[in-house]
Image (spheres, rainbow, N blue to C red):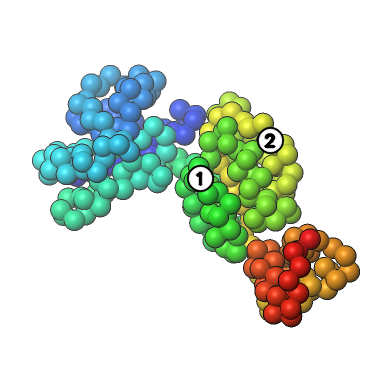
Amino acid sequence: MIILAATPIGNLGDASRRLVEALTSARVIAAEDTRTASHLLRALGIDNRPRLIALHEHNETAKAGEIVELARDEDVLVLTDAGMPAISDPGFPLVSAAAAAGVPVTVLPGPSAVLTALAVSGLPTDRFTFEGFVPRKSRRAHFADLAREPRTQVFFESPHRLGETLADLAAEYGAERRVVVCRELTKLHEEVVRGTAAELAARFAAGARGEICIVVEGARPRTGDLADGIAQVLELVASGERMKAAAEEVAEHTGFGKRELYEGALAARRSAGDTSSPR
C-alpha cells in the first residue's frame, strides 16, 4: 500500500510514534526531497537506509504510475519536507493514481500547518477554507474573487512577498478585516501576530523571515440589498466624499464588496446622464 506520513513542521518532538515506527521499518520512501528525508532519519536517531525515490512537483505526475506499481508488492512511505503529503505539497497525483488502480492508501496523521495556524488564530474555526499559496501574479483579482467568502480563510505565503500580499488583501477585503500572521509555527522563533489587514500590511511592509501562514476572517453577512448600498455610496459622493472612499465605507457596514458598490455607483451615474469622471 501507499502510506502518507505527516512529518513535523518544525519541532522534531512532534514526530508521532507511528511515524518513527514506519521510518524504522520502511524499505521504500518516496520523498519530496531525499536529502530532507535522510536528515529526518538521522535527526530522529533511526538507523535505517531505505530506498529513496524523489517525488516532487516537477516529476510527481510522471512518477505516480511507477510508484503505484511498486506499491502493489510492498509498502511505500510518502513524505514531504514538512506536514501532510498532498496538502499543498506533492502527493495528490499519486493518491489519485492509486485510487484509480485499486492500490490501498492509508495515512499516518500528524502535524499540519493549516490546522495549527487555524487553531491558534482566534478566528472562527467551525467553517474554513484552505486557499494554498497566494498566486504571485494577479493577487488583487484573486483576492477580489474571495472577498465575499464568509468562512475563515487560510493561505500560505512566501516571507519576502508578505507585505505586498497583505497590502493587496487590505485593498480588496477592506482595511478593517481581521487577519492573523503565523510565522515559524512550532519552531523556536514562533510568532503569531493579530490585527487588521491594514495594521499587518504596515507591520510586515518589509517582509519577514521563515514559514508563513495567513489566516483571514470571513466576510460579514450582507445587510440590506445592493441597490440600497449603491444609493448610500451616491449620497456620500454627493456630500463631497470621493467615490472610492465612499464605496469602502459602505462596504464596511453592509457587507457588500467595495468593487461592486463602486461599479454599481458608476453605472447609476451614467444611467442618470452624469458622464463626469469619478473623484
Q: Which residue is more in the foreground, 141 or 120?
A: 141
- Give the residue pinned by disc 2: 205
Residue 124, x across and y down, in percent: 61, 57
Hey, which quadrant is residue 90 in on the image?
top left
**Residues at circles 1 and 2 in contact by the CB criterion of under 8 Å:** no
24 relative position to 165: left or right: left
Kind of residue indicated by mark 2: Ala
Q: Which residue is drawn at 25% across and 22% down?
A: 48
Q: In this view, does 133 lie above or below 209?
A: below
* The N terminus: image quadrant: top left
Residue 272, x across and y down, in percent: 74, 80
Q: Is mark 2 on a helix, strand or loop?
A: loop
Q: How crowded is mark 2: few (under 14 residues within 10 Å), some or many (20 or more)?
A: some
* The C terminus: image quadrant: bottom right
Q: Which residue is drawn at 68% across and 63% down?
A: 258
- Give the residue pinned by disc 1: 137
Mark 1 or 2: in front is: 1
Q: Is residue 163 above or below residue 220?
A: above
35 relative position to 134: left or right: left
Q: Is mark 1 on a helix, strand or loop?
A: loop
Q: Residues within 10 Å of mark 1 (few under 14, many from 20)?
A: few
Q: Which residue is more in the foreground, 241 or 64?
A: 241
Kind of residue indicated by mark 1: Lys
Residue 165, x across and y down, in percent: 60, 43
